Image (cartoon, rainbow, N blue to C red):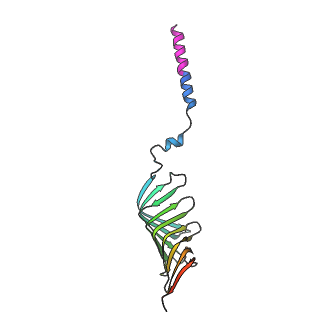
């Protein structure tokens, strides 16, 4: 009787264990994400000074007091809540500076969304003012469809959009709404 009772208990434990084992799913990814809030950043970095080179030549410097890393999201991005300074170097190593109060850099698309008091100061002393501007790192192109003011040495152009290559040799204001010559 004791043998039969212990066999029944052993059988029940075995059935329970096998049932438990096969009922569990492989949630390794969920286990990895325990403790990572979907709404919070994965990491926070301060005093960013990132340099990008290509073929041994410095092309871009990205500086910011704070960066929030949201690479734990399905569409990964990096947020710069305290603003950004982006320095672009042309082929002659002349620098143009881009400033904004806030920025988001999207990892998959290579797009940087610059927002709030966006200012571009080019190497030839031209200045663009906008509230939003995008920089496509892959195409090396700056653009917006928002109102802009573009101040050059002899004129000021207002419009509803801007397109330019990274060297500002093809810069143009779109949908011009005002044009003033300064040397008249």
**Left or right side of 74 for 116:** left
> Where are the magenta residues, as a range?
1-13
Magenta stretch contains residue 66: no
The percent position of residue 150, horizontal first and vertical second, equals 50, 79
Residue 134 or residue 51, whichever sits in front: 134
**Dominant SS in magenta:** helix
Please, which residue is most extreme toward the front here? 177
How many discs mark residues in the rendered view?
0
Residue 177 or residue 173, whichever sits in front: 177
Instruction: Look at 54% across and 23% down and name the residue there.
Output: 16
Instruction: Look at 44% across and 59% down and name the residue there.
Output: 67
**Left or right side of 167 for 101:** left
Residue 131 or residue 88, whichever sits in front: 131
Question: Residue 167 lies in what quarter of the image?
Answer: bottom right
Instruction: Look at 54% across and 25% down and name the residue there.
Output: 17
The percent position of residue 158, horizontal first and vertical second, equals 51, 79
Please, which residue is most extreme toward the top here? 1
Magenta stretch contains residue 2: yes
The percent position of residue 164, horizontal first and vertical second, equals 56, 75
Q: Is residue 162 above or below residue 18?
A: below
Instruction: Look at 56% across and 35% down and name the residue there.
Output: 25
Q: Is residue 166 above or below residue 179?
A: above
The percent position of residue 48, horizontal first and vertical second, equals 43, 63
């Amino acid at each position: 009787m004791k043998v039969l009772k212990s066999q029944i208990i052993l059988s029940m434990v075995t059935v329970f264990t096998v049932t438990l084992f096969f009922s569990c799913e492989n949630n390794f990814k969920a286990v990895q994400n325990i403790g990572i809030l979907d709404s919070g950043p994965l990491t926070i970095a301060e005093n960013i000074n990132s340099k990008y080179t290509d073929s041994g030549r410095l092309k871009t410097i990205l500086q910011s007091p704070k960066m929030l890393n949201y690479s734990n999201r399905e569409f990964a991005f990096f947020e710069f809540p305290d603003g950004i300074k982006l320095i672009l170097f042309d082929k002659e190593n002349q620098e143009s500076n881009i400033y904004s109060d806030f920025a988001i850099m999207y990892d998959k698309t290579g797009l940087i969304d610059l927002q709030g008091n966006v200012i571009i100061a080019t190497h030839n002393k031209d200045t663009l003012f906008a509230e939003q501007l995008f920089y496509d790192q892959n195409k090396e192109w700056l653009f917006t469809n928002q109102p802009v003011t573009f101040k050059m040495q002899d004129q000021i152009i207002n419009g509803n959009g801007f397109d330019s290559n990274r060297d500002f040799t093809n810069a143009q204001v779109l949908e011009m709404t005002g044009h003033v010559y300064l040397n008249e």
